Image (cartoon, rainbow, N blue to C red):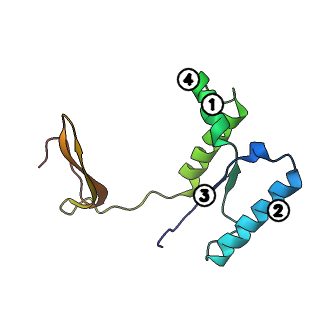
Amino acid sequence: VGVPAIVVFLNKIDQVDDEELLELVELEIRETLDRYNFPGSEIPIISGSALLAVEALSKDSQIQKGKDPWVDKIYQLMETVDNAIPLPQRDIEKQFLMAVENVVSITGRGTVATGRVERGQIKVGDT
């Protein structure tokens, strides 16, 4: 598939009371990663509850790190992604090329193309 690095988020751990079951699930995840040629023993696995994090953020959108354990898990996930996933090397010296993946019409804006930048760079006002 061409995915060079991966981080796993084990969701809904608030639904499981048995710590041994969580360890078993993590072991199975690592075995599955090994089966697909990822280094299962080295891949970071972060456990949490996305729903409880969203609920906490819905009550207080300015919640800071250390104030809610479920939001902290999301902070931990993002820090792990930042550290474990290398930034892709982009060839910015060549002419801009974007692979268009979708085109949508937005009322008041017109037609908008979305996609992935393959090379080059673009600035506001470029055509």
Residue 106, by quadrant, is top left
Q: CA distance from mark 3 to mark 1?
A: 23 Å
Q: Specify few, some or many for label 3: CA neighbours under 10 Å numbering under 14, 14-19, or 20 or more.
A: some
Q: Residue at x 71, y 65 (%)?
A: 29
Which one is in front in this view, the residue at disc 2 or the one at disc 4? 2
Please identify, in this view, whether the residue under mark 2 or under mark 3 is nearer the observer. 2
Q: Which residue is mark 2?
A: 24
Asked if one can make out residue 119 in the rendered structure from this viewpoint, the answer is: yes
**Residue under pointer 1:** 55
Residue displayed at 84% across by 57% down: 21
The residues tagged by marks 1 and 2 sit, at their Cα atoms, a distance apart of 28 Å
Gap between marks 2 and 4 measured at Cα: 35 Å
- Marked residue nearer the N-terminal end (2 or 4): 2
**What type is the residue that disc 3 sits on?**
Val
Position of residue 50 measured from the top left corner of the image (x, y, whole percent): 63, 42
Q: Secondary structure at mark 3?
A: loop
Secondary structure under tag 4 reads: loop
Say whether marks 1 and 2 touch (CB < 8 Å). no
Please report whichever mark, 3 or 4, sits nearer to the chain's N-terminal start: 3
Kindly check if marks 4 and 1 are in contact, taking CB atoms under 8 A apart as contact.
Answer: no
Q: Which residue is mark 3?
A: 7
Which is more toward the observer, 24 or 92? 24
Q: Is residue 36 above or below residue 65?
A: below
Q: Earlier in the sequence, mark 2 or mark 3?
A: 3
Name the foreground residue: 59 vs 23: 59
Badge number at residue 62: 4
Q: Would you say 48 lies left or right of 89 here?
A: right
